Image (cartoon, rainbow, N blue to C red):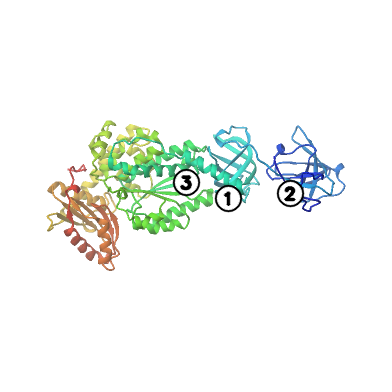
Amino acid sequence: MTADNAGDSGGEAAPDSEGDSRPVVYDLAPNCTRDDVEVGANYHAVVNGVVEYGIFVDVSDEVSGLVHESNLDRSYEVGDRLTVTLEELKGNGDVAFDVFTESTYQTVVVDHEPDLTPIAALNAGDTAHIQGQVAQIKQTGGPTVFRIADETGIVSAAAFREAGVRAFPAVELDDVVRIGGTAEPHDGSLQFEVDSMTRLDGEDLTAARESLDAAFADRAAPAAVDPLVEWAAFEKLREDLSELARLLRRTVLEGRPIRVRHHADGDGMCASVPVQLALENYIEAVHDDPDASRHLIKRLPSKAPYYEMEDVTRDLNFALEGRARHGQRLPLLLMLDNGSTEEDVPAYENLAHYDVPIAVVDHHHPDPEAVEHLLDAHVNPYLYGEDYRITTGMMCVELARMIDPDVTDDLRHVPAVAGLADRSKAEAMDEFIALAESEGYDRARLLEVGEALDYAAHWLRYNDGQSLVNDVLNVGCDDESRHDELVDFLATRAERDVEQQMDAAAPHLEHERLDSDAHLYTADLDEWAHRFTYPAPGKTTGKLHDRKVREHGEPVITIGYGPDFAVLRSDGVRLDIPRMVAELNEEVVGGGVSGGGHLVVGSIKFVKGMREAVIDSLVEKMADAELDEELSSQAIVDTDV
């Protein structure tokens, strides 16, 4: 035990002196144990119970005993303070005290420094002390359950005051605590039954946080994996992807939930599903709770190409309910194939009220000045002088492998699916397709998988459809034949629905040859396409566009529009859609234009009553757009003939 002379004489302060001959009375810290006391020593005590045969006293939270009535010369009540002498430590755990009656003494404060057991070293039946950061506080109908993370692992610690009543109410999320108790088996894992809990402060807190920080940083180090395909353009992104993998792994170690938002299309799912699988595996490796992955990661699609206020409101409500009901920390938000533009800012600013960390992996044209100060991590090829051809799915396959390299065998075909689904013209596409072919996926099958993903995403709407999407993509799927059957079924249904939509819309395409020699096609989808079915307006416009590209073999621009939106596609023409959106918003007064995209694909929204002015101005900009052979299709990535 550690003793500090406080100096006390009959309750009055006295100087500390080696030659002080007055008897010593020890003032034990609340967490002092039997190891810190000895027979014959004197202690400050508090009465915790009065019985016929004496009084029970506490000399610390963990050391109590009886002063027999034969040793009392007066009556006491609960809460009274006195000094006692330890007479006996009995083998059955009982402790006997006598009253210490000297009026003059010196007080020595005793701090308890127990031997700490790493959480990862706990075994059932161990009586021990652990120390760590509070990651969750959940009040059940019985005990209060604290999730404690130390340098080695995470464990549930159950403390009981009375049924349904919060134990240790002064302890809060993110506090660092020292806990005494016993490890017991509980529902297939260990649970620490709490006898004592102390919040650290001062130098102890500083030292503990430094130790935790160093351990988390070391354990969060991402796996050093070689890229699936050697690609100079992609190498520019690897360092930032590695740092994001470190951030996500550390988030898991600290017990913070992760909420994934992704674009609801093929590339968005090729990005999110591998990352989700890798994080689930890592959560299961770190946490003792078999249900931890179900509580700590949630993936949801976003229909819009940016983070809408509807989505952020849902996410915040879910997070706040989780904090209130389950005592969880607020989550880290991971945006995939979305989140780099000015349109995302209002939602991010809403999250900033709650200090929710945000990380983004996206390949849409970014507005770094608008979003960077709101983000904890941002990976986007445009920030490295590259562009949309490096798809989010390609990036996130490597991110997932850095989080958990064991997922590699499940993911070799995924970059090719992502690239074809997003019409990437990346120089590495042939290598990605060759890699997929080595796993049994030829180009036609990859296209069918992408089509099946899009079809499933359309009908899932705001649901993650985890098992279904995993089976379609064959990531974390435990039945290869089911994967094949699902892709066959969904791709066939998608092809049928696309043909029906083309039959309705294609005859009503309006054609104009621009001064640049590019072909411009416009389609009023509100009038001439089936609504509320597959394919949606964006997909419908893309399919119409692909047909005309095949037909002409020349630069083509296609605009599919409705009452208050327009979808834009181009081939062989550099549109710079983000710049066009900014110009339209300034030039069409009252148009309320917003949106974004890449150089060759995008979407905008506008005020319904201003549709004609917006579309006319948009067509004028198309006429001025520069032709660019680098943006021309070398191969049509579609299945319809």
- Residue 257 is labelled as 3
Task: Give the residue at mark 2.
Answer: 6
Indicate the position of residue 414 as horizontal and vertical percent values: 31, 38
Q: Quadrant of residue 24?
A: top right
* Element type at mark 3: loop
Label 2 or label 1, whichever lies nearer to me, is 2
Indicate the position of residue 132 as horizontal and vertical percent values: 57, 42
Amino acid type, mark 3: Pro
- The N terminus is located in which quarter? top right
Residue 260 in view: yes
Which of disc 1 and disc 2 is earlier in sequence? 2
Extreme residue in the bottom direction: 589
The front one of 368 and 300 is 368
Quick one: label 3, few (<14), some, or many (20+) residues within 10 Å?
many
Task: Give the residue at mark 1.
Answer: 172
- The C terminus is located in which quarter? top left
